[in-house]
Image: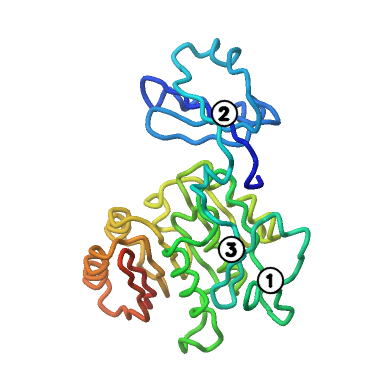
Amino acid sequence: MRPETILTIYEIRAAAAKDLDFLGGPPEPEERFGSDFRGLHFEADFAFLFFVNDYDLGPFLSQYPFVEVKQIHRLRYDQWQDGATMEPMSVGPIKIWPWFEASQTPNLSLGLNNQPDLSSDCPPIYIDPGLAFGFGGHPTTKACLGFLARLYRPGALGVKSPLTALDLGSGTGILALAAARLGANSVLGVDHSHLAVRSAQRNAELNALNSQVKFERGLAQDYAKAPGELVLANMPLFVLKDLLDLRAFDKRSHLIFSGLLASEGDTFLDLLTQSHKALKLVDSQRDDRWVSGLVEF
């Protein structure tokens, strides 16, 4: 969707979260609600239904009397994205461009001053956040992109760059797609959000990387043993602790972590060091709010 697109968002509720499970299908929401439907997001005992025009929910509600519309929101797409800019950005060789540039500037990379760089070997990554959040500008995402660029720079760390990666909490797919652009030949992204997984799958297709990068919906903890030499984990401390308890970082070559508040970084690194005595903290990045790091096992 373009920034000026007007969304109509129906907030529907039920007595309990399980009472809304039927929304996930069958039939699939697209079949149920038609071509103006754009997405579904669950949150506890309520859900958001997104449309690009007003939609008559009357026939739908008559089939499910235990569901009610609590509010109707109308706002621009860029307002839903909290005003996040979608300007081209770059982190090292990694170029992130908005999806609506894809047809206008194929196979060009972003250089200095947001100008196309015809000499780059790394094509831009086109991102359509859809109704999920994340175009790449968040400090934690930027930090992870910087570590990816360093990890995949030839000979930079004196070790072989990972050929497989596992992105836990993959969001709109930026990190997974960047890993593939830089040299990983197989990447699995996992996120619990319907909106995020749908956006990530669309972005993989948009960048012709859907043969290398797959996205699945689920909890990070349920994928603790999924294959991947590199683990990408931009997520809260409580999830990282769960992953440590599940030995999710055993038999990996590298970990890129982020999403930790400044007060949590040392806590996580202490726990990680206790369970992986031989680890090496290759680099870390701290600002007044976030801590991120690149670890070699």
Instruction: Please say if the residues under marks 3 and 1 sit with CB atoms less than 8 Å apart.
Output: no
Say if 129 sits above or below 48 in the image: below
Question: Which of the pair 204/10 is nearer the observer?
Answer: 10
Q: Amino acid at mark 3?
A: Leu
The numbered mark at residue 123 is: 1
Label 1 residue SS: loop
Kindly identify which numbered label has been placed on residue 177. 3
Measuring from the top left, give residue 273's x and y in whole percent.
Answer: 24, 73
Q: How far is the residue under mark 2 from the one under mark 3? A: 28 Å
In the image, which disc is placed on residue 25? 2
The x and y percentages for residue 47 are 46, 30
Q: Which mark is residue 285?
A: none
Residue, x 66% and y 29% (percent of image)? 53
Tag 3 secondary structure: helix
In three-dimensional space, the C-alpha distance between marks 1 and 2, rounded to whole angstroms, equals 37 Å
Locate the N terminus and report the quarter of the image it occupies: top right
**In this rendering, the label closer to the viewer, 2 or 3:** 3
Q: In which image quadrant can residue 174 be found?
A: bottom right
Return the disc, 3 or 1, that comes first in the chain's sequence: 1
- Inspect the image, locate mark 2, and give the three-letter code of the amino acid beneath it: Gly
Labels 1 and 2: the sequence-earlier one: 2
Examine the image and state in which quarter residue 28 appears: top right
Badge 1 amino acid: Pro
- What quarter of the picture does the C terminus occupy? bottom left
Q: Residue at x 64, y 72 (%)?
A: 114
Question: Mark 3 and mark 2 in contact (Cβ < 8 Å)?
Answer: no
The residue that appears at 41% across and 60% down in the rendered structure is 234
Q: Give the residue displayed 32% in from the left and 58% down from the top.
A: 240
Give the colour scheme shown.
rainbow
Q: Is residue 145 left or right of residue 275?
A: right
Label 2: element kind: loop
**Drawn side of residue 89 relative to residue 13, left or right:** right
